[in-house]
Image (cartoon, helix red, strand yellow):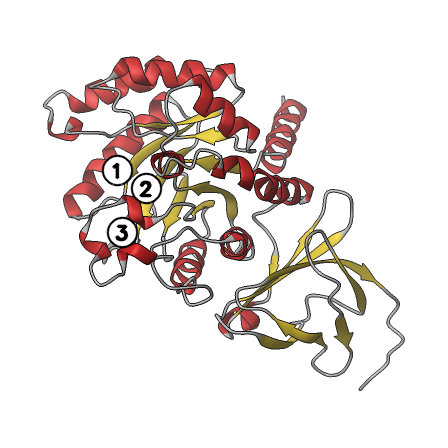
Amino acid sequence: MKNGLIALFLLSCLCMSAAEFIQGIYTVSNTDAAFERVKRAGFNYVQAYHNPYAVPDRVAKQFELAQKYGLKVMACVVRGKILDDPEGYDKIRAFIRQYKDHPALGGWYLYDEPHGKEKVEQLKKVWAIVREESPNVKSMLCIAQKPDWRDFTGIADIIMADSYPVYDEPFPEAPLHYYSNYVRDMSRYGKPMIAIPQIMNHKGYDYPAQEGYDVTKLRYPNETELRYFFYSALTMGNTVGTFWYSFHDLAEDKNVTRLDKLAPLFKEFNDFAAMLKDTRTPAVLNWAQDNGFHAAFFDGKDGKKYFVLINGWPAKRHCLRWTENLIGPSDFVPFGFTHKAKLTYKPGKQNKLQLEGFMGPWETMIFEVIPKPDNGEKK
């Protein structure tokens, strides 16, 4: 019995370490064309805000299409006024039971951007039902940056941070640090985290947040900004995925080919995440983060090590940072999309990393780290 328990424990650890990085997209239409496009663009999770208590046929269709295209559903649990229904918790339990064993189920989306003390208590009850009925399926909670957001960080297996900072400012003036600061704060709770980056244009929305912005200049994030969203979240630690907002916005702009054009970029993201031993546990350079850089070392599944370095400012900058004793003498080889930049290990009391030239505004660089003998050289 003891050996059996040990084997079960080791198997569970293996499954956790081999967990697939979540690359999801919101508001996917319930059509073959939409699901095929999402699959081709490199996503593995979908979400659509379908209300299982008002439009169960849409939920059933979503699961059917997801299974057909090899995708996973992040299924909405609380929608509409179900919590005001005297039988609401019973209906939630019935919904969980109905789909908990469905092969396309990827996770339970408890609620979208909760707020208020009453919601805290309600969601605790919902989460208890989910854990009781479906203990082996992860639950997720999208938490917006509202005054009481911290009250909700304990109510889910995975917490999610959303922030959409690109409005009408021309590149590189959009305040991308609004997003990365919030993701960083949420990552520090030590729970698995999914970042929710912006892929949409605020132009398609009519809400008070647009006040003060030039609607004619509202825009989509560009490729540099999308890279910043993805890789900065990775460097925070505890990141298990990204969930982009949203497919609907691309379609509503009648720019249905935009997602296809972005497919190579998402392939890059997916390929890099797949190379890593565990996206949750990078060696983070905290001092760099405190000085407007995002930087972390990652162990690869192939035994190699990778260094992600990001400029967290909207201006070009020199980079000379302490290694924080996370790395010894090494060579740094530009990896993937990174241009032929020269990053050098500078030995001495503080062991620094120096980049030749400038980093561009919000620029991301990745290097393969090749350790070399330490000859005791000092400078």
Eyeballing the image, is 63 above or below 326? above
Q: Is residue 26 left or right of residue 368?
A: left
Q: Secondary structure at mark 1?
A: helix
Q: Amino acid at mark 1?
A: Lys
Q: Is residue 339 left or right of residue 89?
A: right
The residues bearing labels 3 and 2 have C-alpha atoms spaced at a distance of 9 Å
Task: Provide residue 281's location: percent of width, then percent of height.
Answer: 59, 51
Q: Are marks 2 and 1 in contact (CB under 8 Å)?
A: yes
Quadrant hosting residue 18:
top right
Q: Dot 3: within a 10 Å radius of its alpha carbon, few (fewer than 14), some, or many (20 or more) residues?
A: some
Eyeballing the image, is 239 above or below 344? above
Q: Name the residue tied to disc 2.
A: 155
Q: Which mark is residue 151?
A: 3
Q: Dot 2: within a 10 Å radius of its alpha carbon, few (fewer than 14), some, or many (20 or more) residues?
A: many
Task: Provide residue 378's location: percent of width, then percent of height.
Answer: 82, 84
Of residues 187 and 41, the one nearer the viewer is 41
Of residues 194 and 325, the one nearer the viewer is 194
Eyeballing the image, is 65 above or below 106? above
Q: Is residue 211 left or right of residue 313?
A: left
Q: Amino acid at mark 3?
A: Asp
Q: Is residue 111 left or right of residue 68?
A: left
Which quarter of the figure is the N terminus placed in?
top right
Q: Which mark is residue 338?
A: none
Q: Dot 1: within a 10 Å radius of its alpha carbon, few (fewer than 14), some, or many (20 or more) residues?
A: some
Q: Which mark is residue 124?
A: 1
Identify which residue is drawn at 25% across, 55% down. 146
Of residues 347 and 341, the one nearer the viewer is 341
Q: Are marks 3 and 1 in contact (CB under 8 Å)?
A: no
Q: Secondary structure at mark 3?
A: helix
Identify which residue is drawn at 71% across, 61% down. 339
Which quarter of the figure is the C terminus placed in?
bottom right
Q: Amino acid at mark 2?
A: Ile
